Amino acid sequence: MREKKAMTQIDRRTEKLTTALRRAGVRITRQRAALLSVLAEAEDHPEAIELQRRAEAVVPGISLSTVYRTLTELEHQGVILRHQFEGTPARFEHSEARHHDHMIDVETGEVIEFANDRIEALQAEIAEAMGYEIVHHRLELYVRRKRAPGDPD
Amino acid sequence: MREKKAMTQIDRRTEKLTTALRRAGVRITRQRAALLSVLAEAEDHPEAIELQRRAEAVVPGISLSTVYRTLTELEHQGVILRHQFEGTPARFEHSEARHHDHMIDVETGEVIEFANDRIEALQAEIAEAMGYEIVHHRLELYVRRKRAPGDPD
DNA sequence: CTCTAGTTGCAAGTGATTTGCATTTGCCTT
DNA sequence: AAGGCAAATGCAAATCACTTGCAACTAGAG
């Protein structure tokens, strides 16, 4: 009994993406479709193994090598970003949001996004002044939650 | 025939360091002494294997595991910094210089240091505004040399 | 529906770094 | 100068995060 499900915003975006990818010569297999939707739904920054776990709900038995291969392909296609934070396996996020940098809570591992135009501009200036142009950059703040004096632990 | 060699600035710094380390309970073995002076003399950002190569001039046969163990210890003691740039093994530098960030020439792999107080201040502000304090940070600009229009290739 | 080049899963391989363990060695104590 | 012992070393093996070779499978163009 096949149900007709309401199409969410994410479904629609994913569908557009698959079409675009197909046009770019990327075959949309079951495992890739699964990863695409898992990535589209992710609000965090999961690692490859976690993505495999989530994709397995749709495609049981999807192999880790396929996950890695697909992530590499999607990165090349500009669909996702790969982040290599300190001391952890690479983490991934879809790249449709506007550019931002990351704060990593060293206590919890939580990743918080932030953006600041002044910093971006300064970086460009610095590179420029030294005769370089920025290809890409990486700004990571490893932080700890601040407690106001008198706050509970 | 033992010669009395003139003591360089670096020798003196290294000597002070070994004393301080010994006081901190770190035994100064031949291999550690070698690594300390190699690190003190280094003006670049060498990787572990390169440090082993350089140390081997003083202590032939120094093992890579000892190099790694020593680097980890020196990092904990605050004597050196470990940098994990994209797509390369970790690189090390002594931490006596004032804080700076890095530009990596993506074409040559060359590492260029730079410092900018405005950026540092902005980072602190951002973290502060979100209720965090910075433990440490990482700012890396992956750059490409800019050619003025008309320059030769 | 066919065909074939692209994709998959599995097992084995890599590269960087870490670890177990028997042996050696700083260096504090005498 | 000598002794003792916890700490450090070298080697081999292990680990971690990926990557790759290969035979079997499958998108999706025609």
Image (tube, coloured by chain):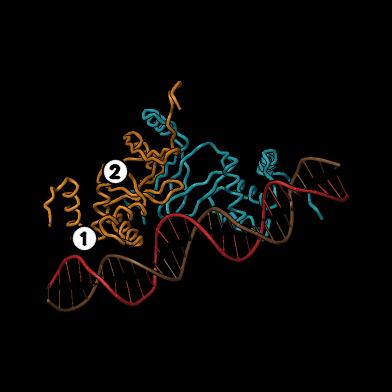
Chain colours: A orange, B cyan, C brown, D red
Q: Which mark is residue B26?
A: none
Residue at x 60%, y 51% (from the top left corner): B69
Residue at x 21%, y 58% (from the top left corner): A21
Q: Chain of mark 1?
A: A
Query: What is the secondary structure assignment of the residue under circle 2?
Result: loop
Few, some or many C-alpha atoms within 10 Å of disc 1 (few <14, some 14-19, many ≥20)? few
Q: Which mark is residue A24?
A: 1
Residue at x 44%, y 34% (from the top left corner): A144
Whether callout 1 and callout 2 share a subunit is answered yes
Of residue B94 and residue A86, the one placed in the foreground of this image is: A86
Figure check: A108 above or below A69? above
Residue B41 visible to an observer of this rendering: yes
Q: Amino acid at mark 1?
A: Ala
Of residue A54 and residue B93, the one placed in the foreground of this image is: A54
Residue B99 picture location, percent across and down: 51, 37
Cα separation between marks 1 and 2: 26 Å
Q: Amino acid at mark 2?
A: Glu
Q: Which mark is residue A43?
A: 2
Q: Chain of mark 2?
A: A
Residue A24 picture location, percent across and down: 21, 60
Query: What is the secondary structure assignment of the residue under circle 1?
Result: loop
Few, some or many C-alpha atoms within 10 Å of disc 2 (few <14, some 14-19, many ≥20)? few
Residue A12 picture location, percent across and down: 16, 49
Q: Which sits earlier in the primary sequence, circle 1 or circle 2?
A: 1
Of residue D26 and residue B117, the one placed in the foreground of this image is: D26
